[in-house]
Amino acid sequence: MINYSPFWETLKNSEETTYSLVKKHGIPSATLGKLRHNKPVNLTSLNELCGILNCNIEDLVTITKDDAGKFF
């Protein structure tokens, strides 16, 4: 299961906001919507967010098994 709660915590602890990600850095609002609802986001977007927020990918996403023991 994909979980982007680390992203929201990292964003909260940074000087950036969702507004600045969209307006200043050109992150599509659709990407933020996917992050908000734990939907798949491509690695290029995650890499760009890591650069903006000066963090590692594990600061943005966790992947865990579901109740059936599967990742997806």
Image (cartoon, grey):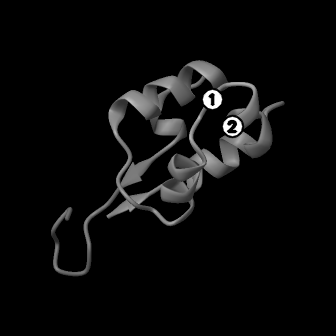
Q: Secondary structure at mark 1?
A: loop
Q: Secondary structure at mark 2?
A: helix
Residue 51 horizontal side relative to residue 9, left or right: left
Label 2, label 1: how many angstroms apart (C-alpha)? 5 Å
Image position, residue 16 (x, y; %): 79, 33
Q: Residue at x 65, y 51 (%)?
A: 8
Residue 15 horizontal side relative to residue 1, left or right: right
Circles 2 and 1, Cβ within 8 Å, touching? The answer is yes
Neighbour tally class for label 2: few under 14, some 14-19, many 20 plus, Cα within 10 Å: some
Amino acid, disc 1: Gly
**Total numbered badges shown on the rendered structure:** 2
Decide: is 2 above or below 29. Answer: below
Instruction: Name the disc covering residue 65, or none.
Output: none
Amino acid, disc 2: Val
Q: Residue at x 56, y 41 (%)?
A: 28
Pick out the residue farthest to the bottom.
Answer: 67
Residue 6 horizontal side relative to residue 23, left or right: left
Neighbour tally class for label 1: few under 14, some 14-19, many 20 plus, Cα within 10 Å: few
Q: Quadrant of the N terminus?
A: bottom left
Instruction: Name the disc covering residue 26, or none.
Output: 1
Image position, residue 17 (x, y; %): 79, 41
Name the quadrant containing residue 27.
top right
Question: What residue did someone put label 2 on?
Answer: 22
Q: Quadrant of the C terminus?
A: bottom left
Q: Residue at x 40, y 60 (%)?
A: 39
Decide: is 56 above or below 8. Answer: above
Image position, residue 21 (x, y; %): 70, 34
Residues 30 and 65: in front is 30
Q: Residue at x 57, y 18 (%)?
A: 51
Image position, residue 41 (x, y; %): 38, 46
